[in-house]
Structure formats: C-alpha cells, structure tokens
C-alpha cells in the first residue's frame, strides 16, 4: 500500500535535496530497481546487483606481478555476508560493519592462483579513486525489521545504504526529523538498516543538522565551511542548481513520490538555501568519502562523527606537519579550540590521520598533560577509540625514557613533570627522529620551566603541537614560540554561534565582602603596633582567610542553598561551589549538612595550602581521615562522588571544590558555578566553562550556565581577556551576560512578542487572535517568540538582583499567562503539532503566584482528539461556534492523517465529508451551529466502526470488507476473493505476526499461490507483487483486529 508523501515537505525540501545530489554526481535509483535488487524484500537493505557490479570493478589482486579479478562467487559472498551481519546491539554491529567498509583490507578472500589457494585483501569502497565508486540516491525508501519505516531519502555507495535523510517543510522544526531518525533506530523499528548508517541528516530549506548512529538530539549539529565566505561558497553551489535533470529521470522521481508532486517542474533559477549548503558541504561524493574514512570514531561504545571545527583542524594540522624542513624538523603549532568543543576528539582524529598517512613512516606519538586526572582521561579516551596503536602510560621518568629509547610504536601518555624527573636517566641521550609528535594538552600550563628544557633535550627534532581551550596569554607567547603560530582557532563566540555550548549569565554579589574588609581594617587600627607592623599584618590576612571565616561561610551557604532550591530543586540540574580554602570547603559542607535540604560533597586534595592556618589544617586532616575510614581510598571516594554528581539526577546536587575539577571536568548537568574564591587568568576562564556544556534535561531545560560570584571576579575576567593574545576583551560581552544584559534581552523578547500581535485590532477578543494567526508560518513565529520570552524570563528570575533592577515583573507575568492561553487556543483551533512540555518547569517558575502546577500541566498538554472529555473542555473554551467547528475539523483531519493507513477508503470519505461541511459553513449554506453539531457527530463516530463491514455479502467478515474497499485489484473483483484472502491471513497469524519476518514471508507465499491458482486475476509479476504488498501492509496496519 503506497504511503503518500507530504506535498509541502516534498516540494520545499525533499525534491531540491535530490536534485542537487543528482547534479553533484549521484545516480537516481527508481523504486522498481530498488525492489528488484532487494529481492522484493523490505528487510534486505543492500542493492545486491549494484554492489556486485561495483565491488567487481574496485577489487583485484596482484600475484607474481600479474593482476587478477576476484571470482564472482567471492563477490556474491562478500555482499551476502555483509547483508546478513547479525544484529548484536546496534552500536556493536555498526562498529563491525564500519571496520569492514572503511578499510582497504576490510575482508580477505581466498582465490585459486598458480596452483594453490591464497588470501587477498578485499574492499567495499575505493577511497583512493572516487570515480571507481557508485553513488546512488533513492526516495521514499521503505525498510522492515521489527517494525516498518519509510525514509525520505537514502544514499548508497556501491549499493550500501550509508546515509539516511529526513526532510521537513519550512514551518516544521528540523528537530522533529532528528527525533524521527532516533526513533527509527529503536528496537521496535528498524535498527538493522541503521547498522549500515554513517551519517544521519535532518533538513528543511533553512536548517540542516547531522549526526550519526546513537547521537542524542541535542548533539546533532550544523556544518560550516571555514576560510571561505558565504558568497564564494554560494557561487560554487550555483554552478550545480541550474543543471537540468534528464526528463525521464525527473518523471520517475515524481512518480516514486507517489504523485505528491505530479507535473512539478524542476526549479532552475533559485537562491542557494541553507539546505543546499549542507548538501554540498557534507554530502558531495569526495567530502562524504573523507568523512566516512577519516572522521568517524567509536569511543567507548559511542559512535562519533567530526564536527566541522574538528574536521578542518585535523586537515590543517596534517598539511602543516607533513613535510620536514631544512632544520630537520616538522612545523608544529597551536590549536585553540574553546572548552566544550571536543578538543580531545580532535587529538584522537589527528593521531588516527597521522597513523594512516603513507608519507609519514612509523609516526611515534607522545601525549603530555600536567595533571594526573587528565593523564588518565586522555589515556582512556585514546584507548577506547581502538586506534591501530596500543596506548601506554609512562609510570615514572625512567619508564618514560625507556619507552622513548625503545622506539616504542605505542602511543605514550605522560605527565609533564616526568620529563623533569627523567633528567638523571637520559644523560647524553637524545632521540633525533623527526617522526616523533608531541601533543601537549592545555599547552599554556604545560610548556614552562625545567620540564620544557628536558623535553627539548630528549626530543630535539620532535614536532610539538599544543592544544588549548583558552588562547595563549601575551606573557606566555615567548615560552610557546617553539610551537609555531596558531594552526586553527575555534573561539567561544564560534561555539556559541554553532550552539555547541551555552551562554553564561553572570551575577556578582560583592557588598558583604567590602564591609568585612573595612571592619578588619578598623580592628587592625585599634591594635598598638607600628605602621610597618600593621602593614605586615594586613598583608598576612589574605582574602582567602577573610572568606574562610566560618560566619561568612555560613552566610554564603544559606544564600547559595536558597538560590539553588528556589531555581533548580528537583530539576536534575546541578551546581559547583568553588571555596577559597580547604577549610572553607569543609565548613560549607558542614553548614549544608546542618540545614539538610540539599545533598553536597567535597572534593579536595591531600596537600595543604601554604596559607592555610594551623588550626584549619587540623580540621582538614580530620575530615580527610574520616573519608578514608569510610572508603577504600580517597580516589574511590572522588570517583563515587563524581559519578553521583554527573550521572544521577537525584544524587549529589552541589559539589564543593577548591582547585580540583576546575579544568577538564565535564559534567553536562552542571549548571551553576558559585564562586567564593578569587580566580585569575586561565583558571578563571577554565572554571566558568564548567557550566557551559549542553545538556538535554527531561524536566527543566538547561538554556544557560550561571556564574554567581561572591568574590569580585568580574574585574578579573576583564583583566584576563586583556592578557590574552589574539583575544578582543570585548569578546567577553559575547560570552558572559550580566543581569543588565538579560534585562535588555528580556525587554526585547517582550517587544518582539507583542509586535507579532500588532495586527489584532481588539486585543481582548480571543477570536481575533484565532483569525489573525491563520497562516502556519505566522503561528510558528508566534510559538517560537513565546518560548524565547519564557526562556529568558525564567533565566532572569534566577538572578537575585533582577527583582531590584526590574519593576515590571508582575506585568510581564500576567502578559505571559495571557499569551500562553492564546497560544493554547490557537494550537487547538489549528491542531498544530507543537510540544511545550519542555517549558513546563520554566512556566511554573515564572507564574508561581498566578497559576497552579495543575494549570500549567493543562497549558502545556498535548491535545488528543480521542481523549473525549479533555478535548471537549478545551473546545468549549473557544468563543464562537465557527471557531469550534473549525477546531474540530482540524483535529479530525489530523487524526485521519495519523491513522489513514488503517482504512484509506473510509478516511478519505470522512475527510471529504469534513471538508464539505466546512465549505458549506464558509459559504453560509450551513449555519455555524449546524456545522458544529454535524462535525461533533463525525468526531464521535471517528473511533467507532463505520466501515460498513456488517453487510450480508461479506458474511459479517469485516476484514474482508476492509480489503475489498482498499486493495486496488479487489475493488472490482469477486467478493469471495476478499473473504478468502482475509481467512488466509487469519488462519496463519500468530502473536505479533506483523513483526515476524518469517511469518510474513509464509503468508506472502500463501497469498501468491492463492491469487495465481484460485482466481481469474491475470496479473503480471510486478503487479501481483505490488498487490500482495498492499494487502500485507493493510493487514499489518490493522494487526490489533486481525
């Protein structure tokens, strides 16, 4: 049974997508060929004939200076073995398939040559000569596993389905296509197809997102080209758009779209869209092959694909290091990719490219960090990515030198201080190999002092590449000149534009600190000391000591707890508190425990701070001793705390630190950073980045990170920006938003929202709003504007001084409630598929005194026409009979669209009846009230049995009537055929038969035999197969009654 494509979706997105692919070198593959090459089975996914043809072309082997072709039997075996790869977990199976198809030696086959059997490498894709491969595109591709799916577009390379695409019309958010792709991978749908998938794309005319198998929706991302302007890029793409596609091919495409675009003409003169840019940038054949071969990784059970900054960084590094200069060294440099942008993955991808580069023989790789936890993290990351080299961690300085002396092929990870400690073991030794590559993580910290000198002494010709999440400071430039210039930059502003990190909202709370300082000054003045002694005493009283005062700590703890519970209680979002000293951290924990309203934990190192008071050191020692008594070790305690904080929404809510976990600590649900300590330079920029990670929170959306600062760090941030080279201090304004900034943003979002309703002449008449927002694009803009206003309003209310700085809070709350009510009425009237559940908690936070949680549930609820009482109550709140009638009509049409495949004939009649009632009402041939009453009857009967099944001619067999009315070949044939076919299905069905491929095959064969042997329906093979598919699809759609 054909599934009708959505015309708007097809015309706006699907067709232009396919047109550009064809003009980029893809061959269109018609449905007939797809069906034939898959052996008439939707549970087979490879195009067997195409695969056999092109694998024969790209595979040969050399023996005794002669070239031979592989046997046809081995070619067929290769295709069938890949097709029949057992599904043993989607990611594991995907990994198995990927390792086979990405390599030039993915498989070996034995061939008889020179009197004996010998093994030779076999490949599925020729990555060296792109023109040897076949690139194909299909539309409306149906696939069957446990469930059935239909993919808008599938791309094939040599008959392998490697890219799946979902298209949406402009008024539908692309994220809906992303969610569809994620759903299709589930065990109830078609994971077997997606085991072959390398790229997954969701697109409409103005948006293009990509990911891979298992990518969460939050991490689908855009692709941008670097080092080329939009104008120059569009000029390149414009060369392909006007190319006219062969008329017969184009007619076939239109036919395969099931008539959704009948008689549509190819548009040859149009502007380049964002979708076009995505297709060209990501899916043109040479780029697609490069991404599949070099930019996909399996990292500890997670499949990952490069983002564009990683892709271009790796290309630039490889271009830079490939040649050895006259000085016997390769050029190094610095890669500055802001925190949260996937710097570690960039390092792994570079090493992968390095290992496989044929021009660099036996590259030796050393990865240097300056912290034990980062060393472990880097080692584990590289190990979990299954590169072609082992990963070894240098245990000591001597062990490091031994590994270098041995010429070890393994990837060596080491702490920088091990170079310094190695100096007693490498006297007179140096390794002059230019193929040693030293990757230095957080290069600004690691390249200094004696360790730097020892590194140069041991590895004088090594290529040094620094990676940093913050730009180098001006005073660091000299010590890092050895790296060379910046190879690639991906700034905070870039990451924000790409929405791969979140903006940060800053609020300073500093008054109490100044008052305390003044009091201390007065107290010192009262002491009988000389001026010199007073100055020395003042110097000895550091801000850390002041802020570690237990009374102040208790005040901070109370304020922090109130702020956290008021804004993030039971949300699943977490906070990190930076204390000025270890003693203060323990005091914070003590006070939080006394109030016992929020779960907290402390993570501090064992080494003492130099400025920690002796009495405080005893407190710290006692606390650490108590931890060690409860846990096997301090490391085990820290591991458990981090896991509870990072992974368990009900676990540790606030983690308290001093110096640890301020860099390299990645916990996406971490949302608020409470600073009670002064930080500077890199440490400050690294710390604030702990809360900018994306997180797909199921309850309260994480829309920003919050910096609540009790220690006057704002000035330090400005100073820090000024210290960095290649960094405009004004960039801070793009990164960190103050309460004043957020107020301006809120006012603008409020103004934008009300600008959309200016055309409503009577703002008190809800009916006018319904009429005014009749156009779908205008409604979408309205919905998006309300969501943006609610998001910013919720963020503002989390800032303590917002209430002091803004006096229209109540007005904004009342207006938001009004707009939400209007939105709900519009949504009901037009049966719009808009989900506001993610904003429920934000609305509760904003409208706390205006609505109950129950009311918010109603305001954000999805409306289901079959939920009779609920639906009726919503419709009853609409004022006019005409709008009520049109709301019912819209929801009936939507309900029909969703369930049309159950009984197309019946639902077509209902749809025609609904449209007839609405037309007569609009033409005043039917009163609004009468139209409303008639549509209520239609709605009430919608879920009932209206299919005229009980007629005597079908002997009460309702399923036979269903077949007779919907299967083309049965409509004008004998009724007995429909009864017999219904009985064949009924007598051979079993529990969940519609999900059982073997049971479906048996029923299909029985139907084939019956139609061929017991009817006078003289059908060609293709028509017979099509009719049986139509029967099976109809029966599967009604499996609950069959």
Image (spheres, helix red, strand yellow):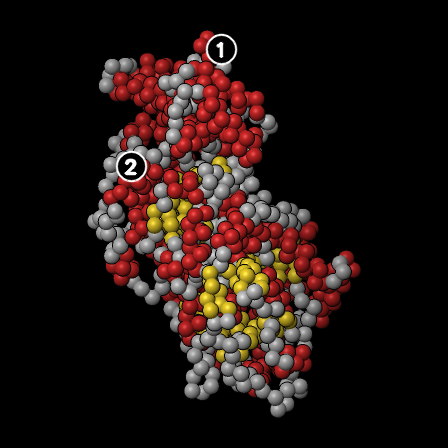
Judge whether 671 appears above or below 35 on screen: below
- Circle 2 Cα neighbour tier, 10 Å, few/some/many (<14 / 14–19 / ≥20): many
Q: Which mark is residue 261?
A: 2
Residue 521 quadrant: bottom right
Residue 782 percent across, percent down from the top left? 34, 39
Query: Which residue shows up at 49% across the image and 63% down it?
Result: 104
The mark nearer the N terminus, 2 or 1, is 2
Choose top left, top right, bottom left or bottom right for residue 603: bottom right
Q: Which image quadrant: the N terminus?
A: top left
Answer whether labels 2 and 1 touch (C-beta < 8 Å): no
Q: Is residue 820 above or below residue 951?
A: below
Residue highlighted by disc 1: 955
Place of residue 361 in the rendered image (x, y in percent of width and height, measured from the top left): 51, 77
Q: Can the viewer see residue 664 in this picture?
A: no
Residue at the location (68% across, 51% down)?
593
Percent position of residue 928, x then y:
30, 17
Viewer-proximal residue, 802 or 525? 802
Pointer 1 local density, CA inside 10 Å: few below 14, some 14–19, many at least 20: few
Residue 24 visible within the image? yes
| Element marked by disc 1 | loop
Furthest-right residue in view?
629
The quarter of the picture where residue 128 lies is bottom left
């Amino acid at each position: 049974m054909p599934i009708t494509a959505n015309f708007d979706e097809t015309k706006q997105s699907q067709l232009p997508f396919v047109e550009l692919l064809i003009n980029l070198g893809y061959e269109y593959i018609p449905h007939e060929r797809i069906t034939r090459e898959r052996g008439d089975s939707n549970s087979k996914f490879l195009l067997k004939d195409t695969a056999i043809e092109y694998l024969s072309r790209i595979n040969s082997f050399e023996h005794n200076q002669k070239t031979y072709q592989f046997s046809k039997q081995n070619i067929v075996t290769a295709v069938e073995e890949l097709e029949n790869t057992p599904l043993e977990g989607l990611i594991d199976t995907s990994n198995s398939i990927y390792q086979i198809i990405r390599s030039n030696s993915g498989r070996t086959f034995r061939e008889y040559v020179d009197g004996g059997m010998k093994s030779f490498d076999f490949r599925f894709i020729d990555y060296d000569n792109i023109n040897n491969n076949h690139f194909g595109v299909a539309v409306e591709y149906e696939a069957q596993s446990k469930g059935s799916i239909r993919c808008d577009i599938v791309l094939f390379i040599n008959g392998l389905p490697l890219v799946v695409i979902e298209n949406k019309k402009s008024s539908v958010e692309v994220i809906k296509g992303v969610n569809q792709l994620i759903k299709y991978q589930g065990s109830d749908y078609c994971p077997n197809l997606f085991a072959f998938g390398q790229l997954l794309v969701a697109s409409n005319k103005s948006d293009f997102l990509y990911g891979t198998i298992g990518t969460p929706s939050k991490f689908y991302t855009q692709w941008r080209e670097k080092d080329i302007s939009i104008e120059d890029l569009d000029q390149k793409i414009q060369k392909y758009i006007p190319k006219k596609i062969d008329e017969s091919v184009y007619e076939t495409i239109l036919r395969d779209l099931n008539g959704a675009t009948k008689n549509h003409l190819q548009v040859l003169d149009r502007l380049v869209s964002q979708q076009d840019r995505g297709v060209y940038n990501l899916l043109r054949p040479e780029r697609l092959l490069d991404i599949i071969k070099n930019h996909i990784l399996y990292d500890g059970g997670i499949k990952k694909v490069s983002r564009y900054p990683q892709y271009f960084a790796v290309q630039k590094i490889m271009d830079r290091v490939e040649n050895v200069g006259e000085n016997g060294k390769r050029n190094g440099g610095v890669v500055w990719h802001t925190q949260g942008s996937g710097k570690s993955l960039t390092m792994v991808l570079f090493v992968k490219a390095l290992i496989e580069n044929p021009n660099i023989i036996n590259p030796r790789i050393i990865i240097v960090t300056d912290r034990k936890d980062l060393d472990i993290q880097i080692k584990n990351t590289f190990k979990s990515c299954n590169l072609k080299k082992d990963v070894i961690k240098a245990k000591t300085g001597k062990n490091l030198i031994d590994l270098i002396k041995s010429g070890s092929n393994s990837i060596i990870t080491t702490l920088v201080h091990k170079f310094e400690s190695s100096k007693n073991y490498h006297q007179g030794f140096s390794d002059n190999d230019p193929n040693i590559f030293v990757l230095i993580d957080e290069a600004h910290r690691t390249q200094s002092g004696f360790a730097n000198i020892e590194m140069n002494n041991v590895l004088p010709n090594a290529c040094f590449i620094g990676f940093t999440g913050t730009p180098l400071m001006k005073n660091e430039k000299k010590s890092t000149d050895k790296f060379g210039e910046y190879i690639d930059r991906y700034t905070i502003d870039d990451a924000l534009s790409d929405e791969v990190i979140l903006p940060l909202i800053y609020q300073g709370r500093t008054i109490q600190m100044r008052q305390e300082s003044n009091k201390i000054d007065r107290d010192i003045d009262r002491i009988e000391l000389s001026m010199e002694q007073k100055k020395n005493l003042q110097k000895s009283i550091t801000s850390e000591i002041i802020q570690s005062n237990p009374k102040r700590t208790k005040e901070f703890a109370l304020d922090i707890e109130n702020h956290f519970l008021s804004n993030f209680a039971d949300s699943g979002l977490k906070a990190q508190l930076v204390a000025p000293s270890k003693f203060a951290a323990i005091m914070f924990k003590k006070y939080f425990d006394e109030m016992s309203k929020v779960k907290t934990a402390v993570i501090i190192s064992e080494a003492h701070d130099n400025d920690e008071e002796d009495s405080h050191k005893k407190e710290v020692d006692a606390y650490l001793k108590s931890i060690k008594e409860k846990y096997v070790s301090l490391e085990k305690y820290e591991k458990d705390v981090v896991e509870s904080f990072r992974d368990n929404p009900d676990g540790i809510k606030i983690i308290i630190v001093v110096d640890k976990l301020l860099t390299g600590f990645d916990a996406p649900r971490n949302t608020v950073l409470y600073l009670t300590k002064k930080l500077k330079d890199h440490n400050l920029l690294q710390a604030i980045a702990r809360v900018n990670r994306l997180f797909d929170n199921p309850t309260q959306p994480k829309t920003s990170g919050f910096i609540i600062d009790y220690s006057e760090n704002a000035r330090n941030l400005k100073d820090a920006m000024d210290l960095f080279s290649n960094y405009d201090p004004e960039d801070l304004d793009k990164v960190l938003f103050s309460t004043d900034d957020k107020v301006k943003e809120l006012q603008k979002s409020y103004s934008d929202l009300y600008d959309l309703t200016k055309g409503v002449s009577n703002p008190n008449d809800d009916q006018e709003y319904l009429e005014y927002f009749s156009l779908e694009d205008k409604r979408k803009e309205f919905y998006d504007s309300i969501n943006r206003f609610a998001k910013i309003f919720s963020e503002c209310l989390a800032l303590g001084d917002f209430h002091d700085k803004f006096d229209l809070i109540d007005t904004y709350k009342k207006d938001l409630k009004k707009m939400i009510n209007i939105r709900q009425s519009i949504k009901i009237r037009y049966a719009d598929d808009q989900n506001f559940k993610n904003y429920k908690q934000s609305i509760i936070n904003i409208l706390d005194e205006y609505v109950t949680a129950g009311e918010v549930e109603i305001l954000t609820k999805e409306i289901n026409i079959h939920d009779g009482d609920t639906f009726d109550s919503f419709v009853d709140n609409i004022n006019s009979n005409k709008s009520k009638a049109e709301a019912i009509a819209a929801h009936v049409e939507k309900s029909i669209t969703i369930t049309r495949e159950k009984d197309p004939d019946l639902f077509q009649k209902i749809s025609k009846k609904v449209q007839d009632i609405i037309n007569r009402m609009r033409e005043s041939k039917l009163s609004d009230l009468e139209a409303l009453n008639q549509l209520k009857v239609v709605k009430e009967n919608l879920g009932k049995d209206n299919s005229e099944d009980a007629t005597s001619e079908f002997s009460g067999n309702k399923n036979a009537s269903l077949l007779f009315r919907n299967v083309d070949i049965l409509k004008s044939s004998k009724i007995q055929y429909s009864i017999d076919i219904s009985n064949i299905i009924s007598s051979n069905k079993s529990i969940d038969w519609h999900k059982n491929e073997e049971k479906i095959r048996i029923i299909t064969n029985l139907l084939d035999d019956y139609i061929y042997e017991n009817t006078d329906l003289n059908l060609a093979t293709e028509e017979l197969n099509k009719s049986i598919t139509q029967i099976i699809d109809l029966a599967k759609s009604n499996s609950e009654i069959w």
